[in-house]
Image (cartoon, rainbow, N blue to C red):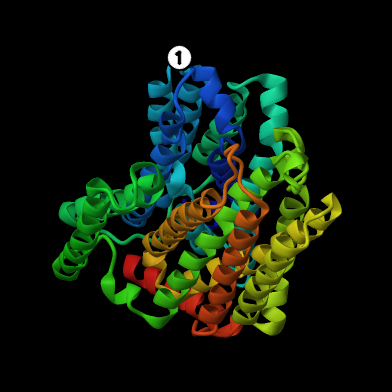
């Protein structure tokens, strides 16, 4: 397809945005309704947790690998593949007759995690250089917005359409997005050819699975149990083996030289800390809202009501994503990231200490959404701007993956804090949530401090680098 006949980047953006938002919805819609899914399948608490764990493990493995394959064979192909996996997984989940089939469907859905790095790569390939930062910011913010919206709509969807509606809705959206990707998204002009090294891919998958399995199931199996300790040990050994294999591979899956650059490792550190705070905030704030008022805190909200109390966060995250690029061009992306995470930290301190009325929670949730929204959007731009075009997919995939690992760590830590402070009835005390929210505020505070370490280029330097990348690709293809 010639440059003159390529699809308008605006149409491409609509397709990419729909794909990213769909993945985020699928990721979060099941979180508030796990107890209803447990009742629907008449299964145990430990079994139903695999509805989340299986998805988490699958996405962690698929995200960087799909990103690298997209860099090699074409991002358009892998976008269709990723969205197709989301659609098929959603269809299987909607029709699942047993909890086993449901868990298998979630594994298929997790493959769709590749949409985020692929989306960033397509934006970098197709958009005018001056528009890349803004498009990446909005697309990245859609991830956080989608998670927030998923928690908000889960209750109403479950009430109106039943359990299967949680999956019929994303199936319709993702199926349409996959078809639109085939029709409208052009073939990638930027490639990193070469055979994908199998050993690094296997080692990456195994150490990620060991680590996330230990983190996500440690509370259930016991943190000191031989299985959990063994998984942590295996993850550490396999991580070392993976780094070594990547360093000697002729065509590495993840280029360790790129990962060691200051702009990449500092951004990944921030992503880890952000994952700790963001996922746990989305997961445990609705639980706080649902706590019966007889406990002396909480609002006795239903699943639907507790989701609606999260609406200010989703709205503010969306609005923040729209203005983040403009803010970054005025005061610099690093300043926006630092200020955003600092605001999120302050908001969580408010949530920990000032939660006696519903409007208190609405204010703190809105501030959390605003802070995370602007920072999250600009963080992705810093990652994309820091690496060569043919590394965009795998590096942004690893960044998303590290954020997922942080999310697993944060959720496990918050769960441990809350469950360590329970009454005889089994319900958490107010102190558990207070300490937990303060700990999440600490994670965002450290993220803001870590963001100060990120080296950045000016917007004009980034634009010149993008143009130079494309000129070099054009010369190579001539």
Total labels drawn: 1
Query: 10 Å neighbourhood of mark 1: few (<14), some, or many (≥20)?
Result: few
**Residue 43 at x, y = what percent?**
45, 22
Please give the residue where the numbered disc 1 appears in the rendered image: 97
Q: Note whether 335 is above or below 363 in the view shown.
A: below
Residue closest to the eye, 55 or 90: 55
Q: Is residue 322 visible?
A: no
**Residue 460 at x, y = what percent?**
59, 83
Look at 63% across and 47% down and name the residue there. 146
**Residue 325 at x, y = what percent?**
68, 70
Q: Note whether 286 is above or below 153 in the view shown.
A: below
Under tag 1, what secondary structure? loop
Q: Is residue 263 visible?
A: yes
Which residue reaches farthest front?
424
Query: Would residue 258 appear left or right of 350 to someone viewing this image?
Result: left
Residue closest to the eye, 452 or 359: 359
**Residue 50 at x, y = what percent?**
41, 35
The quarter of the displayed image where residue 4 is located: bottom right
Q: Note whether 401 is above or below 268 in the view shown.
A: above
Look at 50% across and 75% down and name the residue there. 467
Q: Note whether 155 is above or below 442 in the view shown.
A: above
Look at 43% across and 70% down and name the residue there. 268
The quarter of the displayed image where residue 180 is located: top right
Query: Would residue 374 appear left or right of 356 to someone viewing this image?
Result: left
Q: Name the quadrant of the C terminus.
A: bottom left
Residue closest to the eye, 449 or 108: 449
């Amino acid at each position: 397809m010639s440059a003159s006949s390529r699809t308008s980047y605006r149409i491409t953006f609509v397709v990419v945005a729909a794909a990213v938002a769909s993945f985020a919805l699928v990721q979060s819609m099941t979180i508030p309704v796990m107890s209803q899914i447990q009742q629907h399948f008449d299964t145990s608490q430990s079994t139903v947790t695999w509805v989340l764990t299986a998805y988490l493990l699958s996405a962690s493995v698929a995200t960087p690998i799909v990103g690298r394959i997209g860099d090699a064979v074409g991002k358009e192909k892998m976008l269709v593949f990723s969205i197709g996996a989301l659609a098929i997984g959603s269809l299987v989940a909607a029709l699942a007759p047993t909890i086993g089939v449901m868990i298998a469907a979630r594994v298929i859905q997790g493959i769709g995690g590749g949409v985020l790095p692929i989306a960033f790569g397509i934006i970098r390939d197709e958009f005018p250089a001056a528009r890349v930062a803004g498009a990446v910011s909005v697309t990245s913010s859609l991830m956080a917005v989608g998670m927030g919206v998923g928690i908000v709509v889960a209750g109403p969807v479950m009430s109106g359409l039943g359990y299967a509606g949680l999956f019929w809705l994303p199936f319709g959206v993702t199926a349409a997005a996959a078809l639109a990707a085939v029709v409208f998204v052009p073939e990638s002009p930027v490639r990193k050819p070469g055979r994908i090294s199998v050993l690094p891919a296997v080692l990456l998958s195994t150490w990620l699975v060991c680590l996330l399995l230990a983190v996500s199931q440690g509370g259930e199996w016991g943190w000191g149990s031989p299985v959990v300790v063994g998984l942590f040990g295996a993850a550490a050994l396999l991580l070392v083996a993976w780094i070594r294999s990547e360093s000697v591979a002729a065509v590495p899956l993840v280029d360790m030289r790129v990962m060691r650059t200051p702009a990449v490792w500092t951004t990944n550190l921030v992503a880890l800390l952000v994952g700790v705070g963001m996922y746990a905030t989305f997961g445990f704030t609705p639980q706080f809202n649902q706590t019966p008022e007889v406990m002396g805190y909480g609002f006795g909200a239903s699943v639907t009501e507790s989701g609606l109390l999260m609406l200010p966060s989703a709205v503010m995250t969306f609005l923040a994503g729209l203005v983040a690029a403009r803010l970054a061009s005025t005061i610099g992306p690093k300043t926006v990231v630092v200020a955003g995470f600092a605001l999120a930290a302050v908001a969580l301190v408010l949530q920990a200490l000032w939660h006696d009325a519903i409007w208190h929670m609405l204010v703190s949730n809105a501030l959390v959404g605003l802070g995370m929204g602007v920072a999250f959007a600009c963080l992705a731009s810093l990652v994309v701007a820091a690496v060569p075009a043919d590394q965009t997919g795998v590096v942004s995939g690893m960044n998303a993956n590290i954020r997922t690992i942080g999310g697993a760590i944060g959720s496990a830590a918050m769960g441990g804090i809350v469950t360590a402070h329970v009454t005889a009835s089994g319900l958490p005390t107010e102190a558990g949530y207070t300490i937990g929210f303060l700990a999440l505020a600490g994670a965002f505070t450290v993220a803001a401090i870590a963001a100060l370490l990120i080296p950045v280029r000016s917007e004009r330097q980034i634009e010149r680098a993008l143009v130079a990348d494309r000129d070099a690709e054009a010369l190579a293809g001539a």
